[in-house]
Image (cartoon, helix red, strand yellow):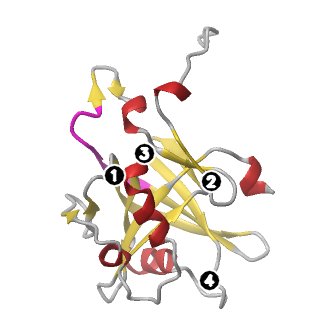
């Protein structure tokens, strides 16, 4: 019910590296901005079916770094494939045939074609809930915005066409037809 009613949710497509150097790439839709000073985001991940940490959480605990990608529909199939429960050490980047480029501040590659990527360092992981869920807080060290996706006012939201998660297997693409401006002055 929660995943079908808190909609749309932004998607964090997170790449990490384990202590053994293995890579992982997985999408998370329980994701959002947390603070602006320093810029931080959070995401949550439930345990694997065997009760252990998902590979992303395991890798974050080991390396303390990640790259969070904001993607559009062109990467949707690869993102869906990366959600498959591959065995630890199987690289979803390779499985999906994705190209990467070196990051500037972390030792994790960036997915080429992602409209936005945040190089991040782990701030903390908090366990919450009955399962429990791992909520990771990550500080953004560096922003990457694909060429042509900015103008004098900042990021061009309508051209990024970021994907959002709805319920079940449903997604939504944000584009110009979905954007409107409120007529209320917010400076009260």
Is 74 above or below relative to 121?
Answer: above
Residue 108 bears which disc, if any? none
Secondary element at image label 1: strand
Q: Earlier in the sequence, mark 2 or mark 3?
A: 3
Residue nearer the viewer, 24 or 166: 166
Pointer 2 with pointer 4, Cβ within 8 A = no
Residue labelled with disc 4: 48
Residue shown at 46% from the left, 78% from the top: 61
Q: Residue 53, percent across and down?
A: 57, 82
Q: Secondary structure at mark 3?
A: loop
Q: Which mark lies nearer to you, 2 or 3?
A: 2
Q: Earlier in the sequence, mark 4 or mark 3?
A: 3
Magenta-colored span:
139-149
Mark 4 is surrounded, within 10 Å at the Cα level, by few (under 14), some (14 to 19) or many (20 or more) other residues, namely few
Secondary structure type for disc 4? loop
Residue name at image x 34 percent, y 20 percent: 153
Please state if 13 lies on the left or on the right of 135 as rendered.
left
């Amino acid at each position: 019910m929660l995943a079908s009613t808190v909609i749309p949710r932004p998607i964090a497509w997170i790449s990490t590296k384990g202590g053994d150097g293995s890579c992982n790439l997985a999408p998370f839709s329980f994701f959002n901005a947390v603070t602006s000073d320093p810029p931080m985001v959070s995401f949550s991940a439930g345990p694997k079916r065997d009760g252990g940490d998902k590979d992303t959480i395991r890798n974050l605990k080991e390396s303390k770094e990640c790259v969070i990608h904001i993607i559009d529909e062109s990467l949707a199939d690869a993102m869906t494939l990366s959600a498959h429960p591959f065995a630890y050490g199987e690289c979803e980047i390779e499985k999906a045939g994705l190209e990467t480029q070196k990051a500037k501040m972390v030792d994790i590659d960036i997915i080429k074609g992602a409209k936005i990527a945040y190089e991040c360092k782990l701030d903390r992981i908090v366990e919450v809930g009955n399962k429990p869920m791992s909520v990771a807080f990550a500080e953004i060290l560096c922003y990457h915005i694909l060429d042509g996706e900015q103008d004098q006012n900042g990021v061009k939201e309508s051209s990024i066409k970021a994907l959002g998660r709805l319920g079940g297997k449903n997604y939504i693409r944000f584009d110009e037809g979905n954007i409107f401006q409120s007529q209320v002055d917010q400076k009260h």
